[in-house]
Image: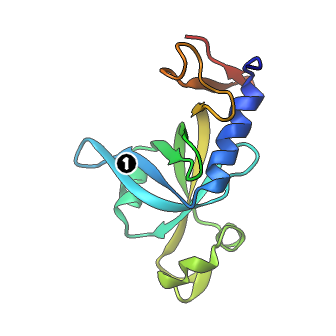
């Protein structure tokens, strides 16, 4: 098994997010407790930023306005692997971003496209990544009972030692 590096963990997390069509966006619900919603995301940016289209009147938007902390969980649809990302989520109210991160299959919800009056983007900024992937050699001792964790510090990713 090769030595575990922060770059490898981040690359595997990105691959998991690239291969999955959906992930859970988990926010703090305004009524208390976690509020999880299965959402279709735009494939992640190089820094693991994720974009989600949603309705401006949705529960997610209310949650984000109340508390920006969030968790994203994603299961690799092809192999036993998962990624958990922790960070903050914010509304993006710029039409050029709405167009840039638009997915054509969202026309079911917004037939007018990215300029629909009810459409808004959520941008998730990742600060911490947890990954477990046996196929990618990420299964820290004792053999897969713990995931590998990297955190963003000083402008880069660092492996967190338990």
Q: Residue at x 54, y 25 (%)?
A: 147
Name the residue rendered at 61%, 39% in the picture: 126
- From this viewpoint, is residue 155 visible? no
Q: Is residue 56 left or right of residue 129?
A: left
Q: Where's residue 8, x and y in %? A: 75, 30
Residue ID for mark 1: 66
Judging depth in this view, the residue of 134 and 126 nearest the camera is 134
Vertical relation: 82 (above or below) 105:
above
User: Looking at the image, can residue 108 be seen?
Assistant: yes
Nearer to the camera, 124 or 145 = 145
Tell me the quarter of the image containing the N terminus.
top right
Residue at figure coordinates x 67%, y 19% from the top left: 159
Quick check: 7 above or below 78? above
On the image, the x and y values in percent for residue 116 come to 54, 83
Which residue is at 68% across, 66% downward? 97
* Quadrant (top left/top right/bottom left/bottom right) for the C terminus: top right
Q: How many C-alpha atoms fall within 10 Å of the one at disc 1: few (<14), some, or many (≥20)?
A: few
Task: Choose between 28 and 73: the one closer to the eye.
Answer: 73
Could you tell me residue 22's position as x and y percent? 52, 59
The way the protein has been coloured in the rendering is: rainbow
Secondary structure of the residue carrying tag 1 is: helix
- Quick check: 146 above or below 84? above
- Residue 143 image offset from top left, x and y in percent: 55, 18
Examine the rendered structure and indicate whether residue 23 appears above or below residue 28: below
Residue at the bottom extreme, as displayed: 112
- Tell me: 35 left or right of 114: left
User: Seen from this angle, which residue lies furthest left?
Assistant: 31
């Amino acid at each position: 098994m090769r030595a575990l590096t922060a770059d490898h963990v981040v690359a595997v997390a990105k691959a998991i997010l690239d291969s999955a069509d959906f992930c859970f966006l988990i926010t703090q619900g305004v009524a208390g407790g976690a509020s999880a919603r299965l959402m279709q995301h735009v494939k992640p940016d190089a820094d693991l930023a994720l974009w989600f289209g949603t309705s401006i009147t949705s529960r997610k938007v209310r949650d984000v306005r109340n508390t920006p902390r969030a968790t994203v969980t994603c299961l690799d649809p092809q192999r036993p692997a998962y990624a958990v990302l922790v960070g903050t989520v914010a509304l993006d109210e710029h039409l050029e971003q709405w167009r840039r991160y638009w997915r054509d299959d969202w026309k079911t919800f917004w037939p007018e496209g990215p300029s629909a009056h009810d459409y808004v983007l959520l941008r998730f900024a990742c600060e911490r990544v947890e990954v477990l992937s046996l196929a990618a050699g990420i299964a820290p001792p004792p053999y897969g009972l713990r995931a590998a964790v990297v955190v963003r510090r000083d402008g880069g990713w660092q492996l967190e030692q338990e």
